[in-house]
Amino acid sequence: MRTTPTILHLDMDAFFASAEQASKPSLRGKAVVVGGLGPRGVVATASYEARVFGVHSAMPMAQARRLAPNAAYLVPRFAFYRSISEQVMGLLRALSPLVEPLSLDEAFVDLEAGGAAWDAESARLTGTKLRAGIRAVTGLTGSVGLATTKMLAKIASEQAKPDGLVLIEPGTERALLGPMSVRILPGVGPATGDHLRRGGITTVEEIAEAGEDELVRLVGKAHGHSLYAMALARDERPVVAERDTKSVSVEDTYDVDIHDRVRVRMEVQRLADRCVRRLRGARLSGRTIVLKVRRYDFSTLTRSETLRGPTDDPAVVREAAGRLLEAVDTTGGVRLLGVGVSGLADYTQEDLFAQAAGEALPLDDEEAAEETGPEEAAPAERRWPAGHDVRHAEYGHGWVQGSGLGRVTVRFETPGSAPGRVRTFRTGDPALEPADPLPLLPGGPG
């Protein structure tokens, strides 16, 4: 374990919600919640203004609405967030070749490997410059933690929130961790935390005092050894620059349980096609087809089939997913379906098409549109997700505040404007069209 605090952890502050506030002047300083807006949706990110009311990520959206009924509730714009994330990750990679992204808004950096820091003073200076650089490039804020290990750097960045920097000085780690809850340690979730509590252990210091043998007895050999080491501030995990993609998958949660078996089969085929498009977009193929079914009673079943070799053929994936579905009882209703491909490779086995029984299944409407071009695709009813960008022929750029009953309400404003006016249109108004996001700062990604 190193003796200098040259491992950096960056965590963007309420990333999705902050990006929405920066994009929409009328929402700055207001409670904003981003996530699935259906009856079974969950919160992806809540702004700090919304967190005052108790709203937090992974909370059911219905509960969030009860806690903060006057907040703005928006559908995520993942492509927009990804474009901002790429800028942030570019700043990190300028510091070191060893950057380990954990998500769009979070990453570890080994500053020593890039020569960006070699002691506490240089590490603090680098972290300060990084935060300033993120604000200058994106207009958003991030919190930075610096320490001798990944575990401690992540704890430090959490303490730094929002928009701060915390450096844990070498030699102070045990004193810092001691009074903290056991839940602060990686891998200690609600179940493990309750198990330790029943054993009389609630703080990190109590884990250290209990000893390794007692931890092994309580939570098992592998988990006990790692928990004891972390309680002593030991963490030998290196910053890993590249993480191989292990699987590609898509899933949908339905507002109302699906009981019709024909509809379930159609949904599985549609998900298989979406999964293949994502697979091809990553220039990958896979050998194992996975079907996920969550039933009406929340029981979740996973079935898989391994092919002779990797494929990215939609007919093969659809056929395999359909065969897996036949082995699952869905008579009580289905609330979630998912299709995935694992065992990934960067090549395909051309003769795998023989594994699909009969002729290739017809393309669905979305895939047919991709194959034939937009001018040949059948027109589809336009949807207006809350928070997404639009452009009106007369009023210019705006975003959807809400829609329903044949109407869509739009607020016309841009990242650099004053809060804009609100107007309502028919959902089929030919003057109103979906639009690409505008950059948060001049010259930035949109």
Image (cartoon, helix red, strand yellow):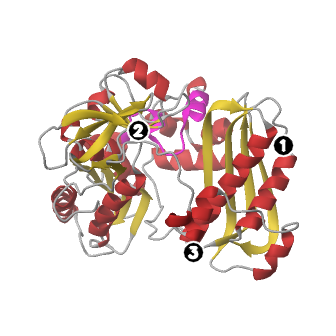
Q: Report the mark closest to the observer, 2 or 3.
A: 2
Q: Quadrant of residue 315?
A: bottom right
Real-space CA distance between mark 2 and mark 3, rounded to the nearest whole angstrom: 37 Å
Do the residues bearing badges 1 and 3 touch, measured as CB atoms within 8 Å?
Answer: no
Residue at point 80%, 60% (across, down): 320
Image location (x, y in percent) of residue 442:
16, 61
Indicate which disc, 2 or 1, sits on the residue closer to the N terminus. 1
- Location of the C terminus (image quadrant): bottom left
Front-most of residues 167 and 261: 261
| Count of marks overlaid on the render | 3
The residue where tag 3 is placed is 283
Image location (x, y in percent) of residue 428:
41, 42
Real-space CA distance between mark 2 and mark 1, rounded to the nearest whole angstrom: 39 Å
Give the left or right position of residue 415, taking residue 252 as reference: left
Front-most of residues 333 and 156: 333
Disc 1 residue type (three-letter): Val
The residue where tag 2 is placed is 427
The residue where tag 1 is placed is 328
Q: Report the mark closest to the observer, 2 or 1.
A: 2
Question: Would you say residue 77 is visible in this rendering?
Answer: yes
Real-space CA distance between mark 1 and mark 3, rounded to the nearest whole angstrom: 31 Å
Check if residue 324 falls in the magenta segment.
no
Give the left or right position of residue 136, taking residue 314 as reference: left
Give the left or right position of residue 342, taking residue 196 as reference: right
For the record, the magenta segment spans 177-196
Q: Secondary structure at mark 3?
A: loop
Residue at point 85%, 74% (across, down): 354
Residue furthest toward the left? 418
Residue at point 27%, 62% (across, down): 445
Check if residue 180 falls in the magenta segment.
yes
Image location (x, y in percent) of residue 242:
48, 70
